[in-house]
Image: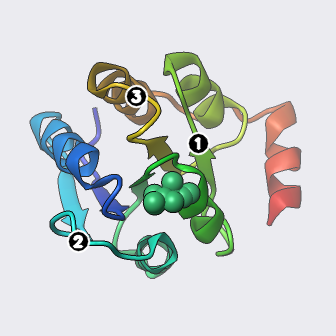
């Protein structure tokens, strides 16, 4: 597996899972750029989604992981940035297809919706799966 830098960010409703996934990424051998939040004090998920997308657009990380209560709010924030594609995933199949078909470069997860083991499986699959290209490439280009 190629070692890359992965940016990771969450709000207070995703911080526990974020910290677990940061450990999982390090265990896989990747560099982790942890953009917070730290602790469970209430914060606003757009601030962390924008920070993650800006770090990726600036070339500070090649992939990202974004966590909030549902994965939805923070993914909406991430997806407002050109070239950054976040997919909310709930299982290994959605994580695989987000990479194969959509070339998603940010995995978004909801701490309140999925368990830790499923989240870790989503992460491992997301990191290990390549974009399929072919007929999907033109469609992804139209997202830009
Ligand atoms: C925070 O309460 C919650 O709204 C947020 O984490 C997220 O689920 C929004 O989409």
Q: In which quarter of the image is the N terminus?
A: top left
Q: Mark 1, mark 3: which one is toward the viewer?
A: 1
Query: SS at mark 1?
Result: strand
Q: Which residue is drawn at 34% across and 27% down?
A: 124
- Residue found farthest to the front: 42
Reading the chain from its start, which is encountered first: label 1 or label 2?
2
The residue drawn where x is 23% and y is 66% is: 33
Nearer the camera: disc 2 or disc 3? 2
How many other residues sit within 10 Å of disc 2, few (<14), some (14-19) or many (≥20)? few
Q: Residues within 10 Å of mark 3 (few under 14, many from 20)?
A: few
Mark nearer the N terminus (2 vs 3): 2
Q: Name the residue under label 2.
A: 41
Closest to the observer, 55 or 117: 117
Q: Nearer the viewer, residue 50 or 132?
A: 50
* Residue 107: image location, x then y, percent: 48, 45
**Residue 140 in picture, x, y percent from top left:** 79, 50
Q: Which of marks 1 and 3 is nearer the N terminus?
A: 1
Residue where numbered disc 1 is placed = 88
Inter-mark Cα distance, 2 to 3: 33 Å
Residue 11 appears left or right of 1 = right
57 or 1, nearer to the observer: 57
Q: Where is residue 121 in the image (x, y as percent from the top left)?
A: 35, 21
Mark 1 to mark 3 CA distance (whole Å): 17 Å
Up/down of 26 relative to 47, above or below? above
Image quarter of residue 35: bottom left
Q: How many labels sit on residues?
A: 3
Task: Identify the residue under disc 3.
Answer: 128
Residue 43, above or below 4? below
């Amino acid at each position: 597996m190629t070692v890359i830098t992965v940016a990771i960010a969450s709000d207070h409703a995703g911080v526990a899972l974020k910290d677990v996934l940061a450990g999982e990424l390090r265990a896989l051998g990747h560099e982790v750029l942890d953009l917070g939040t730290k602790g469970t004090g209430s914060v606003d998920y757009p601030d962390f989604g924008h920070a993650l997308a800006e770090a990726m657009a600036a070339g500070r990380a090649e992939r990202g992981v974004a966590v909030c209560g549902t994965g939805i709010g923070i993914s909406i924030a991430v997806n407002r940035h050109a070239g950054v594609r976040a997919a909310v995933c709930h299982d290994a199949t959605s994580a695989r297809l987000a990479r194969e078909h959509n070339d998603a470069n940010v995995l978004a997860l909801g701490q309140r919706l999925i368990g830790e083991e499923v989240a870790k499986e989503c992460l491992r699959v997301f990191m290990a799966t390549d974009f399929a290209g072919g007929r999907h490439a033109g469609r992804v280009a139209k997202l830009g």
